[in-house]
Amino acid sequence: MTRQIVSYQHLLHSFGTVILAFAMLMALQVHSVVAQEVTFSKDVAPILYESCVECHRPNSFAPMSLLTYEDALRYAPRIRSRVQSRSMPPWHVDRTVGIQAYENDYSLTERAIETIVRWVDDGAPWGDEADMPPPPELLEGGAWQLENRFGRPPDVIVRSTPYDVIENGQDQWWGPTVPFAGLEEGRWIKAYEFKPSWPLGLRVVHHGHATLRAGGQNIGIAHYGVGKRYETFPDDVGMLFPAGEAAVTWNLHYFPVGVGAPQDVVEVGLWFYPEDEEPTIETRGEVLMRVDRMGGMPRGGDILIPPHGQQVLQGAHVLDQPTLINSFRPHMHMRGKEMSIEAIYPDGRREVLGKVSDYKHIWQISYQFALDQKPLLPKGTVLLFTSVFDNSTANPLNPDPEQWVVFGRRGVDEMSHMWVGITELEQEEFERRIAERKARLVSQQGQGGSEEKR
């Protein structure tokens, strides 16, 4: 009797082992089939078309095109490395602190990254031609990017004078003042676009500004950095372009590496509100808020970074009116590592609004808060900016860690400020916006919904 029981138990154990082995084999086969289903035509091309090829196309400033399967196959290992490390597409906001919802967040989702990694690991298969999405409709290289959005070319175009950018790898600046015939009547700017020449200008213009000088005023009508080409103001918000004769002063910083640009001309296009439409709120657009030169010092007098060392700077700015923060754009040079913007409220509360923890001098991205995430700050709020510099070998962009680093305009010197997109509000308008936002958020919570994790 005992022997029969033992045999029966042994049979059950053996049968269970077979079932388990069969299940494991089936799971491996299913996993293999699923993995093989990740192809360029069905899975990878849609990601590249949506997130990469606006820059990665022929004759652009990107180092390679990714428009075709052959292009992507050639660079597959590099693509895998860049997307897995999140160095591409460029998006340097710290994901662990501050506001995480942005209108222009073109970073890849976790699912998109996993898809590309699996595709490369499986040998980068082509797939089925029938799965291939239609080619993306890309604007011509020299076209205005906002023209499609507004359905017309700019209402006004201003141009710099030509400058010969020398192919020497050194910083170069160009600051002409160009007369402007002016407008018969003042107009309200709805959007602007800063357009370097195509294709060489895009490769050599690092950042720049166009300032309108009219009626004793200096109005920053356009600001550009690699990664930030245009700006559209929210509905009912605008910047006044006054009537009368004027001039535009340009501040262009060229950083040519491996290419020059003879007779380079930069253009700025302005789109106005309709003549019979006047926004109720005036904005100054991006405003420069310094982190260096605080405490009455000469500008940059507090920047002194030792060889193989680091430095932390802080700057504070008090808001004289209730303020809506639309965006932030850090600006440092090659030793820049981190920069953050923090709000200290009148009641003492502190909140990190945004932080760039992987700053790259080669990118000057404007991080634009999503509609209901734009900070609404009461009068008396202190904006605290913190910059961190790294002059060690751990900084991959560091040209020479043996040097002392001081303030200067060159990329090998340093500076520290942040361009903040602000709209100053009256108290009544501030309170109205607070109430409207609360109502929208309550409504959204009732509707539920979720977004794919990035």
Image (cartoon, rainbow, N blue to C red):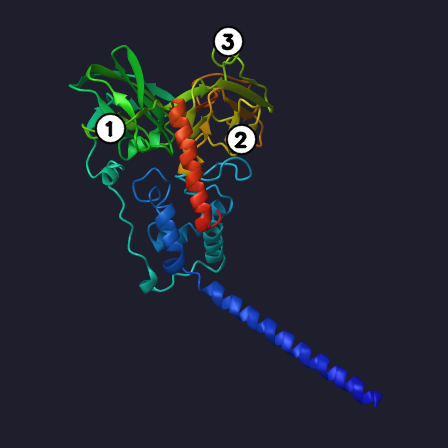
Q: Amino acid at mark 1?
A: Leu
Q: Would you call the spot at circle 3 few (<14 residues within 10 Å), some (14-19), or many (20 or more)? A: few
Give me the disc on residue 270.
Answer: 1
- Work out which residue is located at the far left of the displayed protein and give it: 184
| Badge 1 or badge 3: first in the primary sequence | 1
Mark 3 or 2: in front is: 2
| Badge 2 or badge 1: first in the primary sequence | 1
Front-lying residue, 212 or 174 = 212
Q: Quadrant of residue 156?
A: top left
Q: Would residue 13 appear left or right of 306 to someone viewing this image?
A: right
Measure how far apart labels 2 and 1 are at the Cα level.
33 Å
Residue at x 51%, y 19% (from the top left corner)? 316
Q: Are marks 1 and 3 in contact (CB under 8 Å)?
A: no
Q: Amino acid at mark 2?
A: Val
- In the picture of the structure, the residue carrying the numbered disc 3 is 296
Q: Position of residue 89 (x, y in %)?
A: 43, 42
- Work out which residue is located at the far right of the displayed protein and give it: 2
Measure how far apart labels 1 and 3 are at the Cα level.
36 Å
Tell me the SS state at disc 3: loop
- In the picture of the structure, the residue carrying the numbered disc 2 is 352
